[in-house]
Image (cartoon, helix red, strand yellow):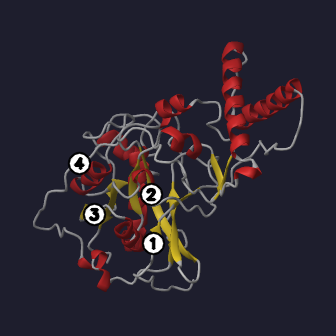
Amino acid sequence: MQIMALSLSFNKFIFAYNFLLLVVWAICQTTTGRHIAADQETSSVAEHFEQWMARYGRSYVDDESEKLKRFNIFKENMDYIESFNRPENNQTYQLGINEFSDLTDEEFVENYMDTLKAAPPIPRRPNNTLPMPDSLWNESLVRIPESIDWRDSGAITPVRTQGPKCDCCWAFSTVAAMEALNQMVTETLTPLSEQHLIDCDVVSKGCGGGSLSYAYLFIYSNDGIAKASDYPYMGSQGKCREDVVKIANISGYRSVEQSDRALLMAVSRQPVSVGIRLGGKFLRQLRHYTAGIFSGDVNGDCGPPDFSHAMTIVGYETFTIGHDYPISYAYWIVKNSWGTSWGDGANTPNGKGICGINQSAYIPINRKYG
């Protein structure tokens, strides 16, 4: 990969982020231009629904009323997806059916999201070197690559899923950044334990939501975090295992300045945990995102002002459009915790600072790295 320094005289930055996971199993194709009778359309949707049930292990043998309810929600979501994907809309990204397609937006929020909690900066100690080295924040000392993808460096583990009924995106986001930093220090990629944070970080609320900063504070104060193999994910909160062996200790953590430029500089150094506001139109589109360039044209409809979901930025890429008056764009590459049926790893630019992605960002620090 050719590494080039980014010019600091860009006319405009519109930073974006990409939701990369494995290729989605698409059971729904755009039907624009097809003129079919209502009963035929319902029959077709019913066939898709049966295929979807088989794919995701849904069964309503003893509850026909629940099956009808889920079918109607599925059909409503499918209609929305097909309407959004029509060619005349000139969308830069596509929506598709996935494992969440039998849920309303309200049910999705109830099952997969909660408010992220803020925390004060970590207390200083004699052996704590905070704040972070000037090499991260001083642009005169930073040579920012034109693009970076920490997957290419072997620093990112495969996508995992938090599952329903455990709102622990904060733990998955923290662990992804910790795994990357630990790999940079040890040159070995070791899956770490979200369950350790869920069970033992008493300041956060386990499956009831948590805090990125408190998660890092827990890891710092407790001399590391367990391996995933020693403390596997259960999808629910349990009793803290005090005797577990811990690795991957950190020197501290740091919040990233609330700007796109600062976030870019941080990601050029290491993966970054971020919180976003996820609601309204943004939620409706994002939970069904499947491919293409996610432009994030939601007109500020991000839902409530609180941060409600956390992910991990694991890279970015920049590109320029225009000659006489060039405009430089970038997209974030983001690891999520919604499983492998969501997203497809396509390049996904998004609007500058969309829904607060640059407002609640944190990185773990290890003096042995950088």
Residue 239 location, x and y as percent? 33, 34
Mark 4 Cα shell of 10 Å, populated few (<14), some (14-19), many (≥20): few
Which of the numbered marks, if any, corresponds to residue 312? Answer: 2
Using the rendered image of the protein, determine whether residue 320 is visible from the camera's viewpoint: yes
Q: Which residue is mark 1?
A: 12
* Dot 3 alpha-carbon crowd within 10 angstroms: few under 14, some 14 to 19, many 20 or more: many
Residue at image location 47% in from the left, 51% down from the top: 229
Left or right, 137 with respect to 44, comes to: left
Instruction: Specify the amino acid type for callout 3.
Output: Ile
Q: Nearer the viewer, mark 1 or mark 2?
A: 1
Q: Residue at x 44, y 83 (%)?
A: 7
- Give the Cα separation between the discs numbered 4 and 3: 17 Å
Residue 119 disc label: 4
Amino acid tagged 4 = Ala
In-front residue for pair 265/165: 265
Q: Which residue type carries mark 1?
A: Lys
Q: Is residue 119 left or right of residue 275?
A: left
